Structure formats: C-alpha cells, structure tokens
Image: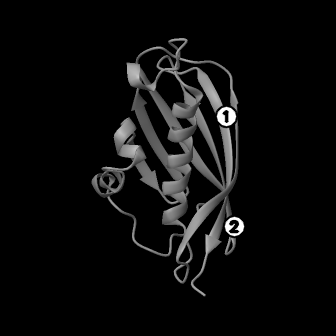
Amino acid sequence: MSPTPSRPLPSLDELNRLGEGKLPGLIGIRFTHLEAGLVHSELTVRPELLAPNSYLHAASVVALADTSCGYGTRILLPEDSSGFTTIELKSNHLSTAREGTITCEARSVHAGRTTQVWDATVRGPEGRVMALFRCTQAVLYAR
C-alpha cells in the first residue's frame, strides 16, 4: 500500500524547477516519474562529474540517490511539519560508469511522523545496478 501524501503532488516540471540554481540543478538531476512513495530520476554522466581516475565520482551517485529520496520525503511530510533533514545515509557502490545516463528509483520504506526511511537503487546506462542506497530523514516541526 502506498503512503498517502498530505499535500498535492507537484508536477515533474515543478519538481525539476526546485533544483534550479542548487546542487540538483547544477549537476543535472532530472525527475522522470513521481508518485507517493516512489520517485524516478536520471543524471547524464559528463566529465565534470567524474573523479580524477575518469570514472563517475561516488559523490555524484550519492547526490542522485539522496536528492531522489529527499524529494520523495518532501511529498510525504506530515501537514504540520516544517521540513526535514537527513540524519543518516549509507551507500554500497557495486559498479561505475564513464558515460551515458544513470537512473535512480527511490522508494519509501517508512513514512512516519518523526522519521522517514528511503531506499534507492542507482543503475548504470546498461541497466546494471551501480549502487544501493538507504537514508533516514528526521521530520522537523516549528518550535
């Protein structure tokens, strides 16, 4: 059963505009699908996102996964909350890429009143799993 958002879902255009001028927009993250508890995104590999060894920098992969989970978290925040912050994240990197477009599927595991837990799978251009990611978000409330 999918979690129920407390706010209307934004359009993909609205979601993509959120990152303009910020890290998601600067590195080129694009959202391709959105529903309560599920977010799909993608990132085109380019030279600026590579490590000095000419492979995709792990931070680029983490940024894609964390951003996808974070945007999903926003959608499932309780109505009376004021926002959220990441309190823990973990990633396992299984492969890498030098070119092409990588994709991410982020899924809600738990969407509670005080925390959310999200899992994400990042896949390489050929569809092979590149990274497994999990994060925990603290839901914030005004004092």
Which residue lies most toward the front here? Answer: 52
Residue type beneath disc 1: Leu
Mark 2 falls on what kind of element? Answer: strand
Image quarter where the N terminus lies is bottom right
Mark 1 falls on what kind of element? Answer: strand
Identify whether 132 is placed above or below 140: above
Residue 114 position in % (x across, y down): 69, 73
Give left or right: position of 97 versus 31. right
Residue holding disc 1: 132
Q: Is residue 58 visible?
A: yes
Residue 91 position in % (x across, y down): 69, 36
Nearer-the-camera pick, 35 or 46 = 46
Residue type beneath disc 2: Thr
Mark 2 vs 1, N-terminal side: 2
Residue 84 position in % (x across, y down): 58, 67
Give left or right: position of 92 versus 23. right
Residue 92 in which image quadrant: top right
Residue depicted at x 50% and y 47%:
68
Which residue lies most toward the bottom here? Answer: 143
Image quarter where the C terminus lies is bottom right
Residue 41 in which image quadrant: top left
Nearer-the-camera pick, 18 or 124 = 18
Residue 115's label in the rendered image is 2
Residues under labels 2 and 1: Cα distance?
20 Å
